[in-house]
Amino acid sequence: MAILVVNGISKSFGGLQVLNQASLEVAEGTITGLVGPNGSGKTTLLHTIFGLIKPDAGTVSFRNQLITGLKPHQIYEVGLAFSFQLPRLFFQLTVLDNLLLAARNHIGTSFASALFLRRRWRRQETELAQKAMQILELLGLVHLALHPAGELSGGQRKLLEIGRALMADPVMILLDEPAAGVNPVLGRRIYQKLYTLREQGLSFLIIEHKLDILLDFADYIYMMDAGRVVLSGTPKEVIENPVFYATYVGETQNAAFRS
Amino acid sequence: MGKKVLALITVLTFFATALVGCGQQTPADKQEQEEVVKIGSALSMSGLLGPMGVKMTDAVKLAVEEINAAGGINGKQVELFIEDDATDPAQCLNAVKKLVEVNGVQLLITGMSSGAASAIGPYLSERGVLAISPSATSPALTGQPWRDYFFRTAPSDEYQGKVMAQLALDRGLKRIVVFTMDNVYGVSLGQVAEAALKEGGAEILAFIKYDPAKMDYRTELTQIKSLNPDGVIHVGYNDDGVVVYQQALDLGLDTIQWIGCDGVYGTGLFKTEASATFMANAVIGTRPGAPEGEDAYENFVAAFRAKYNEDPEVFCDTVYDAVKLIALAANHAGSEDPAKVRDALLEVGQNYQGASGTITFDEGGDRLGGIYEIWEVVKEDGEFKFKRVDMITLN
Amino acid sequence: MDLMIYVLDTLVFMGIFALLSLSLNVEYGFTGLGNFGKVAFFMAGAYTYAITSSFGWPFYLCLILAGLVASVLGALVSLPALRLREDYLAIVTLSFGEILRIFVKAEQWLAGGVWGIAVPSAFANMDFTPRMQTWASVVLVWVILIAVFVFLYLLMNSPYGRVLRGIREDDVAVQVLGKSYVLYKVQALMVGSAIAGVAGGLFAQYIRFIDPYMFLPLVTFTVWVMLILGGPANPWGAVVGAVIVEFFNRGSRILKDHLALPFDPHNVQYALFGLLIIFLLLYRPHGLFREKPLKTGAEAEVAKWQSSS
Amino acid sequence: MFDIGQILVNSVVTSSLYLLAGTGLTLTYGLSRFPNFAYAEFITLGAFCGLFFLAKPDGVFFLALIVAFLVAGFVSASSYTLVFRPLVERKTSLIHLMVASIALGYVLRHSMGESWGWSAQAYQIMWPVYNIGNVRITGLWIILIATAVLTAVALHFFLTRTRAGKAIRAIASNPDLASVTGINRQKVVLLTWFFGAGLAGVAGVFRAADTRLFPMLGWDILLPIFAVTILGGIGSFYGLIIAALLLGLAENFGVVLLSGLGLSTEYRMAIAFLILIGVLIIRPKGLAR
């Protein structure tokens, strides 16, 4: 049962065709990996799915609902969450606030209820704070909860960026290189957490360069090259396919097999 | 944090001391205060009216000097406090409040523009502080509820507008454009003239208002040119007038008769040769004038020239008279109490022969009628000069 | 001579400018919107108050209307610019201030044009002495100031305030986290403009006569000086900044009586303010008071968690 | 009824001024990525420099232009080095940069006001006036139009033929790319700040010669210059040329329309504003992009 269907997305910037009829499907309750060499259009595709970039052609549907053309906050509403490759945190806000800002259906975020439903949002705030602390515990950031996000190190920022997507309580999460910039042990821990969430029914579409980790956890893999999807299958099928090696020939020195 | 608060407190205390310091006098100060009469002047020294206001303030200084030389008021010397209203009515009120509440001034020369006068009027009336405006000329000020403590030595534009219109009619101008700057002075003078012209049977082709701060009037002037009128009624000040005339000369508008007013009377208009040439070619104008043969005006001009090595400009004479009238009234009343000075002003302000002509106040504190001069610009020996053509007496 | 009146007068102006500074704080300090046309909304409020009070309506109704009209204008101005880059918002608001002044000047039927318009005092029927009249204005202004202060303090220490601060840091990230930043920005501008409008109403009420020459871009600049000096995103900073600048403004007039200077300190002060701003931005961009972290109750949970683990 | 020929000439004069004054703004805005509101004061400063030469009737106009160019350029380049570059290096936000530029504007304007006085002053040169049919044109306008055209042509060759010119275009179109290709970015930006404000100073002399000279001179034409810059597309010199022509025509014919409708000609400034709003809604990247 496909939860997300991407059909024939094309996009060009200036004269450069970045996405060329890219299509893929994510089955419900799976971790689906998206791999490919640098510049193959993975990040652009992810941004397009989340409405950050308008596609020239093609459609995206989520749970049989067409979401192309929707704004990111509307896509968030239907149950998706997104995590940037380079963390876009609120650097002057505390780590805790960064997480709380991602909370779904928070009463106090609307003008009127912020003023008139104080009781209710304060109660909700307490509950959300506990949830946020659980996520911080997972990410090992509990001691930094009240520090401004700007004081975090690069790796910690990356963790917080992922944490925000978790905080959003989504049905499905789009992650752009969750294991990049963190040490391999922590990278695996992140994936283990994602895996337990998958067990609970969440779906994932993940771009990852650290293939050794991804291949251990992914249910299905898509590979992109030059703006189109060139290969798909289970991790086993993909690594056994000669196209995979052909595409990565120039990449072997790069991130692909770095572990 | 502690340091920050400390620094803050220090700064605030410094200013607070400065503020309060003026209120608390040492015994020596107190004695001194009894011996002086304080007069405050809050005219525009900067902003749009700054150029006029600076010269007017010079005239105030001159008048105060002369009063002190003649023995002061009720035997006391006059101490002058000068503030700047920056051509902003809100700043004018601010300056007046400072003069009254901090310096303890009760006799003021202020309200240079009609806007400033309107802003300070209610406050003056409530506080019972007397002010004379030398240059607020809007007819709208007449009969305001706060006029009990506010006089003006410049006649209402009601009069001059009629003189301008009459001048145009006398010259046989039938198709006329009214071209005024967009402020109280310009528009009210223009509207009075417009009404009088219509009554006199002339046709008003257009009433064009321009922004005196804009300094580029080519489009408006081109429009006038296209309308092809017999004459233009123009109300402006020196600053914008010089640009208007310069650009009008460029466009060849000097073949039309222009009728100016007191605002465009002054050597400021001769700052560029283009403007001066245009005026000599095309402009005649009106202004409140001193009666022929009276030497009050000539004496004032001579004294001003001796002190500042410059000719007095527009409203210098009315502001000079305003100071002199205050002194005269206070001496007459034998007191500097504003209420008594006010009553005395109504008495001494009857057929007073001032530098700006005969001043007679009505009960509302407005200057009555007056005498108007018709002027033109001539070029004599390579020098441009204003020349009196005629005198008109209005009542 | 009544020094008390002058002190009270100073307090009124401090309160009015503190309101303006707080309103800019909503837009710039918390939401990161550069409103360079603050004076337009101040003016809109002042004129709304002047016109409605000339109908004989009670002053509180006029003040509310002043806030409403300014707030609607704030929304209108923001619409073309908000979806675009922040420098466009700056240029559009700046221009709007100039245009609104031209409009009021040119349309004489509306509010007297260049003649200005007289405004009845809110306490005209109460037979007050001048000093009491000023006292009444001080109380009115400062009661409203305190109310606005508390209102903003509560609003900014709520999840709503958190979203605004998030937008200031990165509006796209906020959008990805499910909040339409356009909506929030429009709301922030409406709240900010409403407060500026009320400040304008209070100004008109107090000064009792307004004309277009009172609303020059200098007012906007002064408000920015206050906020940058006091410290953006800190409500105390906004108020303290207003108090200091107004104090300096008054002080420079009085200083002149005691010091012989070759220039008028009152006129030079804007050049000095300019220098001050440049130095602050270079060496102390957070002003006198730093931004405080949010207080929503969530931070209390952290302590429990940290001590238990 | 209306003198179309005269209004056309007026429009071209207005356009030439906007072109001269807008060139520096569009280039610095394109390179440094923030609107410098103190730009107005460079225009005013140029005008005041001209006063040294033109206070007497026998002043040399071209000398005034050159000195205005150098002084305005120098002050602009110093302000960039002393204020804006340190701010940029501190990763100051866009809004802070704009606030700093407004603050700098007040510093410059009030310093000029205090040193030269707030009252309007005038240059003393008389310009010959020529009649072409019903249309009148002054010597000053001819020089102004010629200067604008020559500057445009020279700048065109500079931007397309020289290394520095190409660098300016490269950085304006893609700020990240230029640092990669080994162009000395700092030098290019500094050069633009100098050169652009120099042209603003020249525009100031023309404006003051055509009208009068006072501290608000630059501020009063800042809004149309911003409108022209955005209309043409920020950083685009060629867009600016078209935009300057369009706005010149729109303003001058707009005033005729305004008075035809019985509205105050003071709305002249609103024309630039309305065009600005229209551009922001329909085509926020301007004409050229």
Image (cartoon, rainbow, N blue to C red):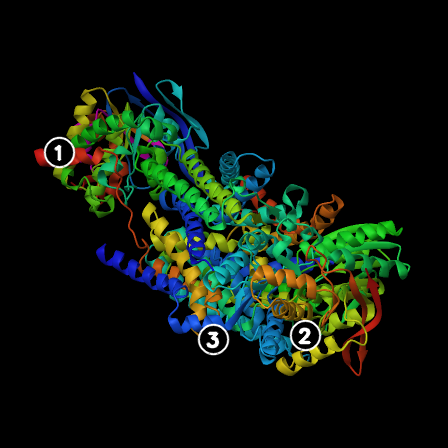
The residue beneath circle 1 is C304
Mark 2 in CB contact with mark 1 (< 8 angstroms)? no
Label 1: state its secondary structure. Answer: helix
Residue hosting label 3 = C262
Report the front residue among D42 and B168: B168
Around disc 1, counting alpha carbons within 10 Å, would you say few (fewer than 14), some (14 to 19), or many (20 or more)? few
Percent position (x, y) of residue A26?
30, 23
Residue furthest right as drawn:
B172
Residue C298 pos. (x, y %): 22, 33
Q: Would you say B177 lies left or right of D160 here?
A: right
What residue is shown at x 57% (from left), y 73% (from top)? B74
Q: Amino acid at mark 1?
A: Lys
Q: Nearer the viewer, residue B57 or D152?
A: B57
User: Contact, CB < 8 Å: mark 3 with mark 2?
Assistant: no
Q: Does any portion of residue B357 appear in the rendered image?
A: yes
* Numbered tag placed on residue C259 in the rendering: none
For the N terminus of chain B, give its image quadrant: bottom left
2 vs 1, front mark: 2
Q: Residue at x 74, y 43 (%)?
A: D261
Relative side of D26 to A49, left or right: right
| Residue on which the image places disc 2 | B312
Q: Which residues are magenta?
A: A209-229
- Alpha carbon of mark 1 to alpha carbon of mark 3: how far? 63 Å
Q: Amino acid at mark 3?
A: Pro
Depth check, mark 3 against mark 2: the one in front is 2
Residue A223, magenta (yes or no): yes
Q: Nearer the viewer, mark 1 or mark 3?
A: 3
Instruction: Name the chain letter of the residue that bears numbered label 3.
Output: C
